[in-house]
């Protein structure tokens, strides 16, 4: 495969070296994507996020086939909730608060069914899982250390929700010098207007936070660098 992959994106072409890239799957957890979880306890329609799963799976499968780095994140708290700020616990006046029992166990609490990643995108052996107490994947975690140690400079971001955990992670990554491509069809929001605004902010002013592209553009670029695979349909 060619050393450099060139992906059609906005505001301009995104390029990466496969040895220096990581796919980051942000918070594809039952608590956010399935009924009965934390997202629903806030009054959200979780079905709005389901469309992200199939395109993300296609990208995940490609990274696995190429033996490229994959990292998953999960937002949640220690069982004793010692890392949970009261301001986060109480904000939004949810019907159930973090740590309380829901249909899938204690909401956003490590070890519960709801805290875990959905089966469709479940990590396999060798893939890193980052447990984070906040919205950004760098806050309170060793993600930066793992990326630096592995020589990673470019991140492909997928996940939920676009304007919260994905945006927080993209901005944290940008401040640390990582080059981010956010895949628009692999990230979603409970609110269409927030989804659109977040994507616009990422790519504004010449890509002030990062680049925005699609899973198809990424897969086509990878396959073009390795022609025997053919184009992604």
Image (tube, rainbow, N blue to C red):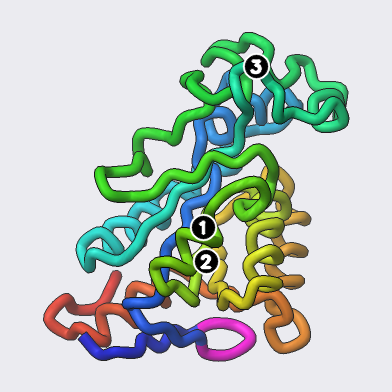
**Is the residue marked by circle 3 packed among few (<14), some (14-19), or many (20+) residues within 10 Å?**
few
User: Magenta: predominant secondary structure element?
Assistant: loop
Position in image of residue 139 (x %, y %): 67, 50
Q: Which mark is residue 183?
A: 2
Residue contact between numbered discs 2 and 3, judged by CB atoms under 8 Å: no
Which residue is label 3 attached to?
80
In the displayed structure, 7 sits above or below 77; it is: below
Residue stretch rendered in magenta on the structure:
9-13
Q: Position of residue 133 (x, y in %)?
A: 65, 38
Q: Are marks 1 and 2 in contact (CB under 8 Å)?
A: yes
Badge 1 is on which residue?
158
Q: Residues within 10 Å of mark 1 (few under 14, many from 20)?
A: many
Counting from the top left corner in percent of width and height, residue 10 is at 60, 83
Secondary structure beneath disc 1? Answer: strand
Question: Which quadrant holds residue 83?
Answer: top right
Specify which label sits upstream in the sequence, 1 or 3: 3
Image quarter in which the N terminus is found: bottom left
């Amino acid at each position: 495969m060619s050393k450099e992959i060139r992906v059609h994106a906005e505001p301009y072409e995104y390029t990466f070296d496969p040895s220096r890239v990581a796919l980051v799957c942000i918070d594809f957890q039952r608590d956010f994507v399935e009924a009965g979880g934390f997202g629903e306890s806030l009054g959200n329609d979780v079905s709005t996020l389901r469309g992200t799963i199939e395109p993300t799976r296609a990208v995940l499968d490609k990274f696995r086939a190429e033996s490229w780095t994959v990292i998953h994140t999960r937002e949640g708290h220690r069982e004793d909730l010692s890392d949970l700020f009261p301001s986060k616990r109480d904000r939004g006046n949810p019907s159930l608060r973090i740590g309380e029992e829901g249909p899938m166990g204690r909401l956003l609490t490590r070890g519960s069914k709801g805290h875990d990643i959905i089966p469709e995108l479940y990590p396999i052996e060798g893939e890193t899982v980052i447990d984070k107490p906040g919205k950004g994947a760098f806050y309170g975690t060793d993600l930066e250390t793992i990326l630096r140690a592995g020589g990673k400079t470019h991140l492909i971001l997928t996940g939920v929700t676009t304007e919260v955990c994905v945006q927080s992670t993209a901005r944290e990554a940008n401040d640390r010098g990582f080059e981010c491509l956010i895949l628009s069809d692999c990230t979603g929001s409970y609110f269409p207007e927030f989804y659109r605004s977040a994507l616009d902010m990422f790519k504004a002013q010449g890509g002030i936070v990062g680049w925005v592209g699609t899973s198809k553009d990424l897969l086509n670029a990878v396959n073009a660098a390795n022609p025997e695979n053919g184009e992604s349909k």
